[in-house]
Amino acid sequence: MRVEDLDTPVLTVDLDALEENLDRYQDYYTQHGIGLRPHIKTHKTLAIAHMQMRRGAIGLTCQKLGEAEVMAWGGLGQDLLVPYNILGKQKLDRLVALATQARITVAADSDVTVAGLAAAVKGAGVTVGVIVDVDLGGGRTGVQSPQEAVALGRRIHDAEGLELRGIMAFPTPPAVRGGIQATLAALDKAGLPHPIVSGGSTKSALQAHEIPELTEYRAGEYPVGGAGHLREGRHTVAQCALRVVATVVSRPNDGRAILDCGSKTLSASLVQFDDGPCAGYIVEYPEARLHGFSEEHGHVDVSRCARKPHIGERVQVLPVHPCPCVNEHNELVAIRRGNVEAVWPIYARGKIR
Ligand SMILES: Cc1ncc(COP(=O)(O)O)c(C=O)c1O
């Protein structure tokens, strides 16, 4: 079957581009002696996670417990990191059950999280690893100082069934090195172990070596790129592997084209670039601006295009944010040079708990 035979809109991944990205990043991490722990929240797909592990990933990162359950079910539970505060009986029961089948590490940034984890594992006969989430300017979760990291690290270290495995931060551009050094120095002074020093984000993924303290790295979007990575020069068009194939369903006037992919296909992600909002990049029409959407319509300004798309024409759209786009789909169609090689179920789709 050829890609032209697929009905639209359809989520596809170009296998040559995907494999090149997987190799390129894995080679970088191998060369620098840093463990690559891919974040599967981007592709949510067992097949790609297996490709990452086969290439030398040290384990996987899953943002939510539900994603980790899917990965363990798919034979990928060797070493899972969930960099998230796990709270509440329902999740803690699931975490303990998962820890009987998988090696698992979670993150914590408060006594409340650590107390819940400690109570859940007590007497359960399992070990759960915990890393301290440190806020080094990301402004989301994370303890706010090296002193807080030490206090929380001590609680984890002292809790039966928990194992202090180190620290994490998000994101980790080279500028956060000082914060990592200060945190590690404080942990060392307190005699607390930190075998894992985990950085993350595709934006600075190829600068990880500028923070030699990092032992491992969580990158999610690197296998597929996207319109944002293209704009910022991290991926070329050819390296942007995730493509929504869409059809032009209307050309109401000379300057407007409407695609059959709206927010229920691309997700509602809209990124503000210098020249306005962007929902995606149209490969065949680089001057076109996919600037908005309704649920099932993509709104494209084609006024700057010398050649304009016609009704019924198919185009390839690089989503501006691949992760929520994938989360809108049941399947990912794997394409090589126009041929359909596989249809992969996106088993971790919708695993938000
Ligand atoms: C905790 C954490 N680590 C790593 C990543 C991966 O970042 P990226 O998607 O830029 O590769 C994310 C992304 O949101 C994250 O939240």
Image (cartoon, helix red, strand yellow):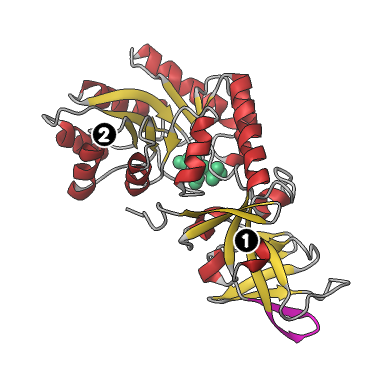
Q: Where does label 1 land, which residue?
A: 1
User: Measuring 63% from the left and 40% from the top, which residue is drawn there?
Assistant: 19
- Where residue 301 appears, as percent x and y from the top left, is 74, 74
Chief SS of the magenta region: strand
- Decide: is 214 above or below 221: above
**For residue 86: magenta?**
no
Residue type highlighted by circle 2: Gln
Q: Is residue 343 visible?
A: yes
- The image's mark for residue 85 is none
What residue range appears in magenta? 249-259
Question: Up-down: is 321 above or below 302?
Answer: above
Q: In this rendering, does residue 150 appear at all?
A: no
Residue beneath label 2, please?
101
Instruction: Give x and y (percent) for residue 195.
Output: 40, 19
Does dot 2 land on a helix, a strand or a loop? loop
Is ligand 1 less than 8 Å from the beta carbon at label 1?
no
For marks 1 and 2, give the CA distance. Answer: 39 Å
Q: Residue furthest right?
A: 306
Tell me, yes or no, whether the highlighted magenta stretch contains residue 253.
Answer: yes
Residue drawn 71% across the image and 50% down it: 230
